[in-house]
Amino acid sequence: PQALHSHIPHKVSDARDLSHNFLNGILPASIGNLKTTLSTLDLSSNQIEGTIPLNLANLTKLIALCLSSNKIKGLIPPNIG
């Protein structure tokens, strides 16, 4: 699969809702480069596939992550949370 076929901005507010946004492809490793104050990220109800990138652990302020209703496979990496 290819990387997401939509743009996720590098600077986002503390809470970001990208649910129901017709995103498809895989989560790129660069998702870990988003603004480090991001506390909530909702990517639910899209067409995202693949695994959860380890770089997501770089979002040290993240307290809520929603990836439901996608095509993600595998386990949640142990370094997240």
Image (cartoon, helix red, strand yellow):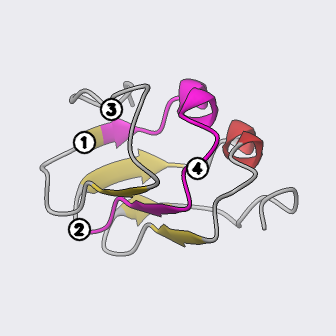
Q: Any magenta on residue 43?
A: yes
Q: Residues within 10 Å of mark 1 (few under 14, many from 20)?
A: some
Label 3 and label 2: CA atoms lie apart by 16 Å
Give me the disc on residue 54: none
**Residue type at numbered disc 4:** Thr
Where does residue 79 sit, x and y in percent of width and height?
87, 56
Label 1 and label 2: CA atoms lie apart by 10 Å
Residue 70 vertical placement versus 29 (above, below): below
Give me the disc on residue 8: 3
Label 1 and label 3: CA atoms lie apart by 12 Å
3 or 4: tag closer to the N-terminus: 3
Please name the residue shown 39% across and 39% down the image: 12
Frontmost of labels 3 and 2 is 3
Q: How many marks?
A: 4
4 or 1: tag closer to the N-terminus: 1
Q: Which residues are magenta?
A: 25-44
Where does residue 16 sit, x and y in percent of width and height?
35, 55
Quick check: 52 left or right of 41? right
Where does residue 15 sit, x and y in percent of width and height?
41, 59
| Mark 4 element type | loop
Label 3 and label 4: CA atoms lie apart by 17 Å
Which residue does the numbered mark 4 point to in the structure image?
A: 51
Residue 27 vertical placement versus 51 (above, below): above
Q: Residues within 10 Å of mark 3 (few under 14, many from 20)?
A: some
**Residue type at numbered disc 1:** Asn
**Residue type at numbered disc 3:** Ile
Residues at circles 1 and 3 in contact by the CB criterion of under 8 Å: no
2 or 4: tag closer to the N-terminus: 2
Q: Quadrant of the C terminus?
A: bottom right
Residues at circles 2 and 4 in contact by the CB criterion of under 8 Å: no
Which residue does the numbered mark 1 point to in the structure image?
A: 24
